[in-house]
Amino acid sequence: MKKYTPLTSLLLLLVINASFFESLNGAKILAIFPFSGRSQYICAENYLKALAARGHNVTVISAFPQAKPLQNFNDVPIVFESHDWSDIILDGNFPSISTWEALDLGIDFLTSSTRKVLEHPEVQKWLTNGDTFDLLIVEALEQDALYALAHHFKALLVGVSSFGTDIRIDELVDNVSPLSYIPAVTSHFTDHMNFYQRLESLYISVLDMLHYHYKILPLQYDLYREYVKNPTTDFMEIRKNFSLLLLNQHFSIGLPRPYVPNAIEVAGFHISHKPKSLPTDMEEFINASANGAIYFSLGSNINSKNLSKEKISILMKVFAALPYNILWKFEAPELPGKPKNVYISKWFPQADILAHPKVKLFITHGGLLSTIETIHYGKPIVGMAIMYDQFINMVRAEAKGFALSINFGEFTAAGLKSAILEVLQNPKYAQRAAEISRLYHDQPMKPLERAIYWTEYTLRHHGAPHMRVAARDLNFFEYHSIDTITVLFGVPLCLLVFTLWLMYKLMKIIARSWNVQNKKEKVN
Ligand SMILES: *[C@@H]1O[C@H](CO)[C@@H](O)[C@H](O)[C@H]1NC(C)=O
Ligand SMILES: *[C@@H]1O[C@H](CO)[C@@H](O)[C@H](O)[C@H]1NC(C)=O
Ligand SMILES: *[C@@H]1O[C@H](CO)[C@@H](O)[C@H](O)[C@H]1NC(C)=O
Ligand SMILES: *[C@@H]1O[C@H](CO)[C@@H](O)[C@H](O)[C@H]1NC(C)=O
């Protein structure tokens, strides 16, 4: 047998190390963020840029290509007919529909965004050429046909969820969310629920699950069959082959809860951590406000210019009467009758505004990214939740004591004004905001570093199968211990029933023979 000399061992070691670092630094990454909502992409953008900056070759399919080309960062833009939610949501006058119908509202949107990606010539080219990637990063939200691409690109699969997890996302890595203290994302509850709240939360979760499995998944499977030329029959298997799930949550912001090892909380990973100075006129306007300034924004997906006339006039009336300057994200160039202490702009550098020491209050729709940014910079809020997880974010913020929430559908001038003044003038809100901010910042590494670390860990360890819980290999009955519980409690129960039956039979036999004896005695 040939022995390795020290020199060949050294060379071998160098080769091994070189290939190790090569695969680590130069991974070929495909990221798919198909939603047309700006905020879903903002959530991941910094993370993807950071991966590119670390030398990975990052290709991103999204509706938001970079304005200036970035090194190692290739955009594959997809175009959406932008979906205008304004008409349904802007006055909080949601049509009264059932939970099931509400779930149905998203179907067209999900189907068309999945289709947009699958039919893209670039994606089709990769599929026909048999191109491969080392890693596929997807937004984890009911787009299973896209998750399945990982199998065809021979890529490891990483999911990013912009709101944390729910019963549908849990399934992808067999995560656990005890329904007894983890409310459904679309509910309005905290982690301390009474019986009826737990019942409602359970009901919502079961509907979510049924809707996912019986309406969304069949559609996703059809899309997969339509666009992937050599489909595998094992769609249900490959769609949930996730190595890692990055969740935009943290227990200091949401609630303390358990996770499986490959579900990692990275809330705040979208924040770049380096506040820049504000445009001069903006900062002058903030500086000019002796009592500090207020920032008001309904987020990137909602246009406040489309609010009803009544709502706009209430807002203007309230703002005009406040001894504070207000920055208002308003998308039109003109706001007729705009009070002097209001500054409008269609875009604000939100993080830099919140970082400014003279900005004292954030009036927000309560989107999770905005909520995280306000906690990052320790500012209290007045919340007006409009849809989806915004309600639960605001319920939590109120429970944590750094927010007051008002009803967006029917707020009055008096109600809005008193909420604003209460949060600004009662110091407890700002104090709580500062405390929560301290808790959030007290982490062993920054959220973005953590996201990068676990992503590269996944690459280093070839999908890190050692992190996956064994639940993946169990069926429903095994997973919920229904089979073992049945045996544990069922067998003694059967034995008991059998024993009782036996005793009954025996007693009958004894009684009969006793009767026979009696009769015989009587006859005799
Ligand atoms: C990066 O990946 C893209 C997509 O596969 C490919 O077209 C490009 O050539 C790669 N760039 C480098 C520098 O390898
Ligand atoms: C929103 O306002 C713009 C004008 O500023 C208008 O063109 C658009 O149709 C409005 N959208 C809705 C849904 O009302
Ligand atoms: C605003 O005030 C701060 C501190 O008082 C000062 O450093 C900054 O230069 C001022 N900015 C402008 C644009 O006046
Ligand atoms: C699932 O992912 C692992 C890597 O984590 C990979 O080795 C395996 O082939 C994948 N399975 C399928 C069915 O694609």
Image (cartoon, rainbow, N blue to C red):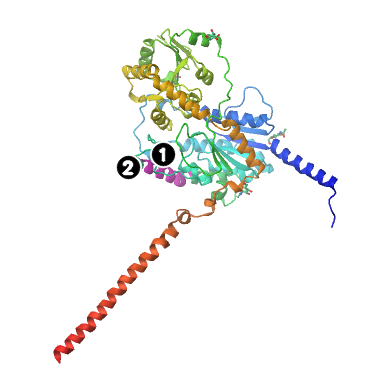
Nearest the camera: 488 or 216? Answer: 488
Q: Is residue 173 left or right of residue 94?
A: right
Mark 2 or 1: the one toward you: 2
Q: Position of residue 508 (x, y in %)?
A: 25, 78
User: Which quarter of the figure is the N terminus placed in?
Assistant: bottom right
Mark 2 CB lies closer than 8 A to ligand 2: no
Q: Is residue 447 left or right of residue 504?
A: right
Nearest the camera: 503 or 26? Answer: 503
Identified by mark 1, the residue type is Ala
State the residue at coordinates (44%, 59%): 484
SS for dot 1: loop
User: Which quarter of the figure is the C terminus placed in?
Assistant: bottom left
What segment is highlighted magenta in the picture? 199-216
Q: Which mark is residue 195?
A: 2
Identified by mark 2, the residue type is Phe
Badge 1 is on which residue?
184
Q: Quadrant of ligand 2?
A: top left
State the residue at coordinates (63%, 29%): 49
In the rendered image, which quarter is residue 179 located in?
Answer: top left
State the residue at coordinates (36%, 10%): 321
Q: Vertical placement of 349 versus 481: above or below? A: above
202 part of magenta stretch: yes
Callout 2 touching callout 1 (CB < 8 Å):
no
Asked if residue 26 can be seen in this view, the reply is no
Q: CA distance from mark 2 to mark 1?
A: 14 Å
180 part of magenta stretch: no
Nearest the camera: 319 or 513? Answer: 513
N-term mark: 2 or 1: 1
State the residue at coordinates (41%, 9%): 339
In the rendered image, which quarter is residue 207 located in?
Answer: top left
Nearest the camera: 112 or 194? Answer: 194
Q: Which mark is residue 53?
A: none
